[in-house]
Amino acid sequence: MKQAICFYFHVHQPYRIRHYTIFDAGSDHSYFNDQTQFADTNNEFILSRVAEKCYLPANRVLKELLDTYPDFKASMSITGTLIDQLEQYAPHVLASFQELVATGRVEIVAETYHHSLAFFYSRAEFEAQVAMHRQKVQDVFGVTPSVFRNTELSYNNDLAYWADKAGYKGIITEGWDPVLGWRSPNFVYRPTYTNSIRLLMKNYRLSDDIAFRFSDKNWSEWPLTADKYTHWLGAAGDNAQVFNLFMDYETFGEHQWADTGIFDFLKSFPEYWKNSRKDRTFMTLSEAIDYFDAVDTVDVPNTITWADNERDLTAWLGNAMQQQAIQAIYDIQDAVIQSGDWQLIEDWRRLQTSDHFYFMCTKWFNDGDVHAYFSPYRSPYEAFTNFMNAWHDVKFRLAEKGFVV
C-alpha cells in the first residue's frame, strides 16, 4: 500500500476596499480602485508584489519539481477574484499557473468565485458563485474540478451533503482534534449522511510547521530542514494513508520570505520523501480519494474552519461589526440581482469576499496579531467604516433604479 503526500495550496487575493468615505457615497462608485501609489489598498500594487515574491518563484519551483520527479503532484484552488486580477494586471503570472495545470499533475479545486461565506447566508448565491468559478476554471485552465473546498475550509455536515448531491468526489476541511477525537487526519474518511463523497482533513500540526513556524527562530525546532521534516512524517504514523499538507500558497515567499530558505525547503523535500521509503509518493486530492478506501465516517454538526484557535467562524463573525456588515450585504441580495446591472452585481459580490469581515476582527493575543498582519487598515473599525460606506453607496445605486431596501 502506498503512502502519499497531498500538497494543497490555496491561492487568493481579495479586492481590498480603498479609503472610502461617506462623502464618496452617492458620487463615486469605485470602491476597490485605489490609485495611490504604494497604498495598502492598491490592489494592482499588492498583486505585483505578491507575484514577484511568491507566485512566480513558487511556480518555478513547482515546475522544476514536476520536471524532475514524474510522480510529484499537487492540488490548488485559485479564487475568481485572483484570476480576474491576474487577467487584468499580470497575464504572464496567470500563464505560469496555466503551465502547471497543463502538465496534468496539478489539480484545480472548486470553490466560491468570490471567496465568500455565502453558503451560510444564501444557498442560491452560493451555488451561483460555485457555478461561476467552475466555468472560469474551465475557460482559463481547460479542466473541471472534482474536489470541493469551501471558503477558509469552512465545513459542516450540511455542506458535505450538498457537495455529495452536487457530484463532487471529495471535499476538504480542517483536521480539528475535537472533531476527529482519537482518529488521525492521515486517512480518508466519509462524511456522515452522504453516499459517495470522501473527506480529506488537513494535518494542521505538520502543515503549520511550514506555514507559520518555519521562520520562527524562537521555535524549539528551528531551523526546519527537509530531512528533519521527513522524519517527522514517519513518526506521525507508518500506517498512514495520506499526509494532507494544506496551506496558503502565499506561505512561499510572502509569509515566509525567500531568505528564510522556504523555497530551498520546498525544492529539496521531495527527494528526502521519495528516498525514505519506496512506497512513498505524491497524489492530488482526487487521486488519494480514488486510491484509498475510507476508514470511518466523520460527523461535523457544527461548522469548523482552519482559522484561529477556535477553528470556527468567529474570525469573520465574532463581533457585532462583522455580524452587522455581513447581514447588511445579504439583506440587499434580491434587489441587487433583480437590478440586472452587471457592474452593480459584481461590486456587491466583491463586497462578499470574506477578507473584508476578517479585517474587522477585534480578537486579542496571537489571533489578533495574525488578523492585524493581514489587514491593510489601521484598525478593525476603519475596515468596518469603509465597508459600510460602500454598502450605503450600493443602496444609493439601487434607489436610483427604483429599488427601496
Image: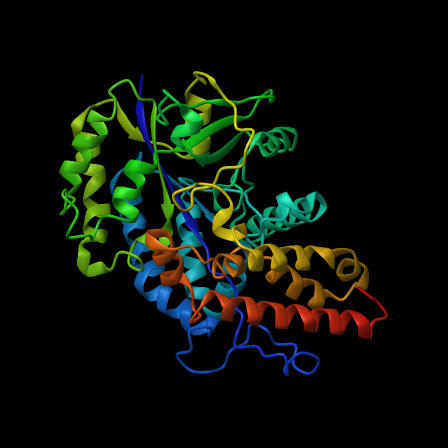
Q: Which quadrant, please, contains the C terminus?
A: bottom right
Give how far across and how far down residue 204 sits, in percent. Answer: 34, 37
Q: Which quadrant, please, contains the N terminus?
A: top left
Rendered view: 241 above or below 339: above
Give how far across and how far down residue 73 sits, in percent. Answer: 35, 38
Give how far across and how far down residue 187 sits, in percent. Answer: 38, 23
Give the quadrant of residue 280. top left
Q: Residue at x 67, y 59 (%)?
A: 329
Q: Nearer the viewer, residue 190 or 217?
A: 217
Give the quadrant of residue 353. bottom right
Give how far across and how far down residue 127 sits, in percent. Answer: 67, 44
Rendered view: 70 above or below 380: above
Q: Residue furthest right?
A: 402
- The number of callouts visible is 0
Q: Residue at x 55, y 76 (%)?
A: 33
Q: Nearer the viewer, residue 8 or 105?
A: 8
Rendered view: 282 above or below 366: above
Q: Residue at x 47, y 61 (%)?
A: 359
The figure's colour scheme reads rainbow
Rendered view: 211 above or below 258: above
